Image (cartoon, rainbow, N blue to C red):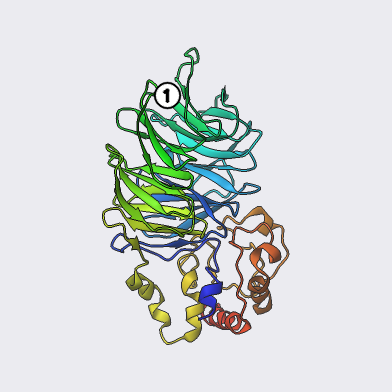
Amino acid sequence: MKAMLAIRCLAAAASFLFGATAHGAELRGHGGPVRSIAIAPDGQTAITGSFDAKAIIWSLETGEAQQVLLFHESQVNAVAALPQGRYATAGADGRIAIWEAGRSTPVSVLHGHDGPVVALAVAPDGSTLASASWDASVRLWPLSGAPSRILKGHHGNVNAVTFLSDGTLASAGYDAAIILWPPGHDAAPMRISMPGPLNALVTVPGDRLLAAGADGTLRQIDRRGAIVAEVRVSTGPLIALAATADKRYIAASAIREGIVLLDSRTLKPVNTLGGAGVATVWALAFARGERTLLTGGADTIISEWDVETGRRLGTSAAIQADLMSEYAGNPDAEIFRACIACHTLGPEDGNRAGPTLHGIFGRKIAALADYPYSPAFRRMDIVWTPETVSKLFELGPSIYTPGTKMPNQTINDPEDRAALIRFLQSETRRD
């Protein structure tokens, strides 16, 4: 139906469910380009950040969008998974927020950068978070709450940070330099001049670095600062890198040229995911025991690729059918298909990424005590009626409910909006 093209979800964030036995998925919930992806240490959870100023926590076991994190004033450039089930988000507003799962507000906010924060990295022992900013500085933030350490040496935007195994931090930027910062306060940093500006860094075995160049070349650097290998990957700038945990593969993305999978030892291309003309990919992360690669970019979708075959994986049709099976024969239910992963309808089902819709009509906005609504929602004076729900999707959430966690989306066809209202009236009424 027309609405399936115009609406992604009636939720705070949306996805189609995919379980442990599914064949992969596309996660659809962001309302703008996806800028960053990180996988939690347990491998079961991912966090993503977007130009829509939101971060979303996803279950990789069920595919469910578990929580939407709304704090930053503009785009979320970087995310990180921290020890003890916590997360970090960093934005163009220069702030870094530390989150605990289930809480609607950060447990702490790290202030100090004077420009956008564009990259985060967690130390090997989990004690420290590193940040790179376009204010030409790098900062080290002890997660114990101790004061941060400011590292200055770059002469322009700092675009990337990564840790070596001994805690040495590597940073890279637009000034065509990599700087190695030893963990001790007294040790002098090592500045390594490179042929051109750098956009991303990743660590590979032997404490070697791979640097993504704006000239489309991937270069390998050893601890002495020597370039030991290089390969031209694309004609345009390389913008993102990721490495498998066993460091067997490297994934590199370039503007409008898809993703190249390389052997980390030889730097020889192994496979190409996508191709010329594909939407720009800004974020990469290996998942599912390194068997798949998650990618996010300009098309707002988080896609999953099979590492061995290079095939883009699709949503499990069986699981989608199972979710909607009880509504078989109801044509209005099709409008709700993309929303069921985030909203429940029955009185006993509880909340998902978005609040339950049971009893929505006649309910005041932000009225459920057990759901972490955004502060903007809590300040509004709206009662959900067929007219107000229809208006929400006629105008779009960012206009009708500014400051919402929801992606900006509309249902343009009045008939499709009416079908959605009929379905909700039928399935969410109180007994």
The residue under label 1 is which amino acid type? Answer: Thr
Where is 101 relative to 227, above or below?
below
Residue 113, x across and y down, in percent: 63, 32
Residue 284, x across and y down, in percent: 42, 48
Where is 185 relative to 215, above or below?
above
In the image, taking residue 201 as reference, residue 150 lies left or right, namely right
Residues 297 and 350: in front is 297
Q: Residue at x 49, y 64 (%)?
A: 342
Using the rendered image of the protein, determine whether residue 61 is visible from the camera's viewpoint: no
Q: Secondary structure at mark 1?
A: loop
Residues 407 and 336: in front is 407
Where is 403 relative to 220, above or below?
below
Residue indicated by mark 1: 168
Binning the other alpha carbons within 10 Å of mark 1 as few (below 14), some (14 to 19) or many (20 upward) gives some
In the image, taking residue 185 as reference, residue 404 lies left or right, namely right
Q: Residue at x 38, y 79 (%)?
A: 325
Residues 427 and 44: in front is 44
Residue 53, x across and y down, in percent: 60, 51
Residue 257, x across and y down, in percent: 44, 54
In the image, taking residue 219 as reference, residue 377 lies left or right, namely right
Q: How many marks?
A: 1
Using the rendered image of the protein, determine whether residue 210 is visible from the camera's viewpoint: yes
Q: Quadrant of residue 395?
A: bottom right
